[in-house]
Image (cartoon, rainbow, N blue to C red):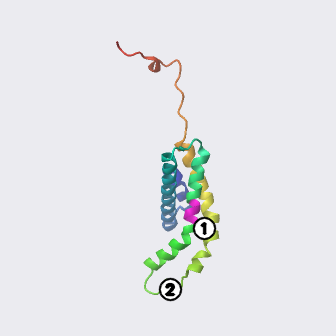
């Protein structure tokens, strides 16, 4: 999971602000995706392929991308000094939605593929010549 969340940090090597933003966003995306995977597992439909896991991660990314303008407006109003956030409206933050979707979804897709590939990696089948798998218990 660390590789799936951490790889976009390399895109912003010297910029601490975007690194924190990307890591926080991907933590939220993976939290939503893992919750939806857990709910589907509890309902009796565990993920049987990597495609299902990637689909859950991408759908969580879509939710995060569509919620980004509202979160941006709320954060600016909370952090900004006095009247600095007065000139930033919801319409202005909604205009960033296409940009967030165009930049965010490819990152989420690659992160989902990396996570699914590493999390659902099949183990090495036991070697038939290995005696440890053919040990009989004492009687």
78 in relation to 50, above or below: below
Mark 1 element type: helix
Give percent across and percent down for residue 94.
60, 75
Please report the residue visible at 59 percent of the width from the left and 58 percent of the height from the top. Answer: 107
Residue 89 lies, in percent from the top left, at 55, 82
Q: Is residue 62 magenta?
A: yes
Most extreme residue toward the top is: 139
Left or right, 11 with respect to 28, comes to: right
> Disc 1 and disc 2: Cα gap in Å?
22 Å
Residue situated in front as seen by the camera: 138 or 88: 138
Q: Report the residue marked by disc 2.
A: 86
- When asked about the image quadrant of residue 65, the answer is bottom right
Magenta part, dominant SS: helix
Residue depicted at x 53% and y 61%: 13
Q: Write the residue at 57% across / 76% down.
A: 93
Q: The residue tagged with tag 2: helix, strand or loop?
A: loop
Mark linked to residue 33: none
**Label whose residue precedes the other's in the sequence (1 or 2):** 2
Residue 133 sits inside the magenta stretch: no
Who is closer to the viewer here, 42 or 72?
A: 42
Where residue 43 appears, as percent x and y from the top left, is 50, 47
Label total for image: 2
Q: Quadrant of the C terminus?
A: top left
Give the image quarter of residue 96.
Answer: bottom right
Q: Read off the magenta span.
A: 61-65
Above or below for 100 versus 34: below
Q: Residue furthest front?
A: 43
Instruction: Where is residue 77? Give x, y as percent.
Output: 46, 79
Q: Are circles 1 and 2 on residues that touch, CB within 8 Å?
A: no
Disc 1 target residue: 100
Please, which residue is most extreme toward the left here?
139
- Badge 2: few (under 14), some or many (20 or more) residues near its Cα, within 10 Å? few
């Amino acid at each position: 999971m660390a590789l799936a969340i951490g790889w976009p940090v390399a895109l912003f090597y010297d910029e601490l602000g975007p690194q924190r933003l990307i890591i926080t966003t991907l933590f939220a995306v993976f939290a939503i995706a893992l919750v939806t995977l857990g709910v589907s597992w509890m309902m009796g439909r565990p993920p049987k392929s990597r495609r299902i896991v990637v689909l859950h991660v991408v759908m969580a990314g879509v939710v995060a991308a569509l919620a980004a303008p509202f979160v941006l407006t709320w954060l600016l109003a909370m952090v900004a000094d006095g009247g600095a956030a007065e000139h930033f409206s919801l319409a202005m933050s909604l205009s960033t939605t296409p940009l967030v979707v165009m930049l965010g979804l490819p990152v989420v897709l690659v992160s989902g593929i990396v996570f699914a590939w590493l999390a659902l990696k099949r183990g090495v089948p036991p070697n038939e010549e290995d005696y440890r798998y053919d040990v009989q218990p004492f009687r």
